[in-house]
Amino acid sequence: MDNKGAGYIAENDINNKLTKHIDIRYHFTRQHIREKTIELFYVPSADNVADICTKALGPEVFIGLANKVLRINPNK
């Protein structure tokens, strides 16, 4: 995950006016965190290869993430 707020909500049973819109099916994640079948950990944007599909990136960041996806070592 690269959103600390979403991770906090997923790991803690928070119910207030800001989280009431979350559909019950998304509580599935909370259940699995409690049961320790999944673990959330923070991934900085510079290392999050999913950003290549979800964000507008500069050329350097795009190439760096594309190299990670394609497993290309630019130092060879």
Image (cartoon, helix red, strand yellow):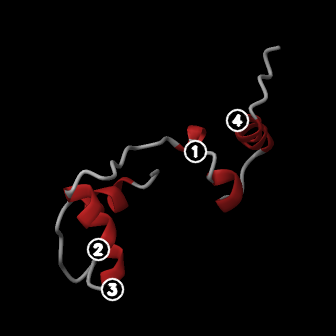
For the residues marked 3 and 4, what is the alpha-carbon distance in whole angstroms? 35 Å
Residue 22 visible in this rendered orientation of the protein: no
Under tag 3, what secondary structure?
Answer: loop
Residue at position x 16%, y 67% in the image:
13
Under tag 2, what secondary structure?
Answer: helix
Contact check, label 2 and label 4, Cβ < 8 Å: no
Q: In which quadrant of the rendered image does the C terminus lie?
A: top right
The disc labelled 3 sits on which kind of residue? His
At label 3, counting other C-alpha atoms closer than 10 Å, the crowd grade (few under 14, some 14-19, many 20 or more) is few
The disc labelled 2 sits on which kind of residue? His
Using residue 20 as the reference point, say whether residue 67 is left or right of it: right
Contact check, label 4 and label 1, Cβ < 8 Å: no
Under tag 4, what secondary structure?
Answer: helix
Contact check, label 3 and label 1, Cβ < 8 Å: no
Q: Position of residue 27 (x, y in %)?
A: 29, 73
Query: Which residue carries the number 4 mark?
Result: 68
For the residues marked 2 and 4, what is the alpha-carbon distance in whole angstroms? 32 Å
Q: As rendered, which of 18 and 9 lies closer to the eye?
A: 9
Q: Which mark is residue 48?
A: 1
Q: Position of residue 28 (x, y in %)?
A: 32, 71
Under tag 1, what secondary structure?
Answer: loop
Please say if 44 is above or below 35: above
Q: Earlier in the sequence, mark 3 or mark 1?
A: 3
At label 4, counting other C-alpha atoms closer than 10 Å, the crowd grade (few under 14, some 14-19, many 20 or more) is some
Please say if 27 is above or below 62: below
